[in-house]
Structure formats: C-alpha cells, structure tokens
Image (cartoon, grey):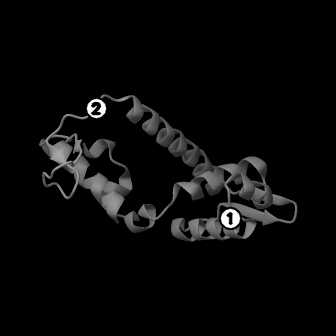
Amino acid sequence: MDAIMPRSFRSGACMANLARIEFTSLKLVVVCASVGSITHAAPRCNMSTMCASRRLQILEERLGLVLFYRRKSGLELTAAGRVVAEHSLRILYLLDEMVLSAKEAPQPIGEVFENSGRASRGAKKVPSLGTSPAACSMENSLQMSVYT
C-alpha cells in the first residue's frame, strides 16, 4: 500500500502545507496559466482580482515556489509553475472523475455508520474499507488528510 501513497504521505513531509491547499486555488492556477492574466482568470473562478491574486500568493507561500512571473503584459509560468499547473489539471480531473464515479456507484452496504462510528437511529450506513492492514492504513491516511 505504501508504494501507491504519495511521497509526502509516506514521509510526513509537507503534510501540513499540502492539507491546506484548496481545489479553488488549483483551479485558479490552471485558468491563470491558460489565459495568462489574473484579471481574466478571476471571474472564471468566481472571485475578485484581488482575491485571486492573494490566493496565488498564499499558494506560492505554502508550496515554497514561485509559480508565475508577473509582468505588465500578464502572467508567465515558471518551470515550477508549469509542473504545478499540469498536476493541478490532473487533480481537478481526478476529483471530477471521483464525484461522477461515486454518483454511479451502488448504494453502500457496510456496517460503519456516520455519526462518529456509533450506530444510531436514522444514521446512514457507509461502506468500510475493510480490516486488512493496507485498508486500515489507507483509511487512516484519508482521515488524516481530511481532518488536518
């Protein structure tokens, strides 16, 4: 199972910063890279130019990278920015794919309940990943990334 987990999950490095990256910021990077301008990208991401600029700045700080050269003529991706934009596009695609696949999945029939893992009236059952060490490790990693 460790072989398929991202390096940062296995080593614990950068986990705090990665857990705080928002999908909206990744979308903003992709759109800015595409249109070459924060002014034109911001409305496409449903935010003001000031908010978009601040989001990019925060993302760059969290990653410890400069993603764009800011010029009067617009934005230009740095080498690191190109890598982040490519991965961001894949992440957003996978997120979309996840949602579509989950909507097509059959109804769950597990013994794990929402509401802090206790059975209660009217609680929805959710599927368990199982009790194998690999499944438990994956479940713990998922919980860690969601709650940190």
Q: Residue at x 41, y 65 (%)?
A: 14
Label 2 packing within 10 angstroms: few (<14), some (14-19), many (20+): few
- Left or right for 127, reference 65: left
Q: Nearer the viewer, residue 106 or 31?
A: 106
Q: Amino acid at mark 1?
A: Ala
Percent x, y of residue 128: 19, 42
Residue 48: give x, y in percent of width and height: 72, 65
- Which residue occupies the foreground of this view, 38 or 128? 128
Which quadrant of the figure contains the C terminus?
Answer: bottom left
How many numbered badges does the structure rendering display?
Answer: 2
Q: Nearer the viewer, mark 2 or mark 1?
A: 2
Q: Is residue 87 above or below residue 13?
A: above
Which sits earlier in the primary sequence, circle 2 or circle 1? 1
- The quarter of the displayed image where residue 104 is located: top left
Picture disc at residue 107:
2
State left or right for residue 28 relative to residue 14. Answer: right
Relative vertical location of residue 20 with respect to residue 121 in this rendering, above or below: below
Residue located at (35% from left, 58% from top): 146
- Nearest the camera: 76 or 59? 59
Question: Which quadrant holds residue 80?
Answer: bottom right
Q: CA distance from mark 2 to mark 1?
A: 39 Å
Q: Residue furthest right?
A: 73
Residue at label 1? Answer: 52
Which image quadrant: the N terminus? top left
Image x and y of residue 91, in percent: 51, 45
